[in-house]
Image (cartoon, rainbow, N blue to C red):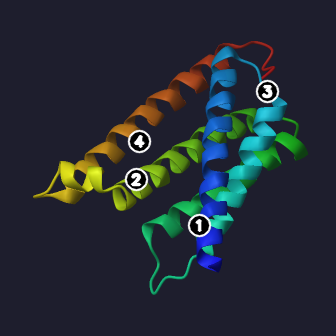
Amino acid sequence: MILGLLKLVHILFGLIGLGAGVMVLFGMFAGVQIDKWSAIFLKCALAAGVTGLLFPAHYFLPTHRAAMLEIYASAMAVLAWRRYRLAGVWALIFALSIIFTLCLNILVAIAHIFDYLPVFKMLAPTQPRLLFLITELVVMLLFAGLGMFTVKRFRDKSNHSF
């Protein structure tokens, strides 16, 4: 019962965080920071990361590693945004932390999709992990490109009003 409730809370934080993260990403593409969506995204990312670490496991899983990295990256974004007000290099740290956190959220969501939805397990019956690894690689490459694009757009902005 408790694990079911924890899983529901974890999934809700993850889904809300993904939606808010996409809004923050679109704002970064436009060169503006949307405070409301940034706050929602960072709170949900932190909550999803913490709840992800609460699940019992007999050994350290890759999703635990991703949850810890997500917590660290979210904390860096909060520090850059709230403590240092995006001054100087902190604006760049904020942008990269947001992109990295969103990428981790999506990678964890993909892992859950491949683990819990039988349709995706049946897509690659002979090598079930191969399709998963290819999907994760494509997502990581996409986010690497998005990160470079965002940093370039950020540096092109003369006022850094991000």
Query: Would residue 88 be seen by someone viewing this image from the given angle?
Result: no
Q: Are marks 1 and 4 in contact (CB under 8 Å)?
A: no
Indicate the amino acid at tag 4.
Answer: Met
Q: Residue flagged by tag 1: what amino acid is it?
A: Lys
* Badge 3 element: loop
Circle 1 sits on which residue? 7
Q: Quadrant of residue 142?
A: top left
The alpha-carbon separation of the residues under discs 2 and 1 comes to 14 Å
Q: Nearer the viewer, residue 93 or 143?
A: 143
Instruction: Say which residue label 4 marks.
Output: 140
Rounded to the nearest whole Å, what is the CA distance between mark 4 and mark 2?
Answer: 17 Å
Quadrant location of the C terminus?
A: top right
Does the rendering let one see residue 49?
Answer: yes
Residue 97 in the image, given as x and y percentages of width and height: 65, 43
| Type of the residue with mark 3 | Ile
Q: Which residue is mark 2?
A: 113
Name the residue beneath numbered marker 3: 34
Alpha-carbon span between mark 3 and mark 2: 29 Å
- Measure the alpha-carbon separation of dots 1 and 3: 29 Å
Q: Is residue 52 left or right of residue 111?
A: right
Q: Earlier in the sequence, mark 4 or mark 2?
A: 2
Query: What separation in Å lies between label 1 and label 4 (alpha carbons)?
Result: 25 Å
Q: Position of residue 27 (x, y in %)?
A: 70, 22
Q: Residue at x 55, y 49 (%)?
A: 105
Mark 3 burial class by Cα count in 10 Å: few <14, some 14-19, many 20+: some
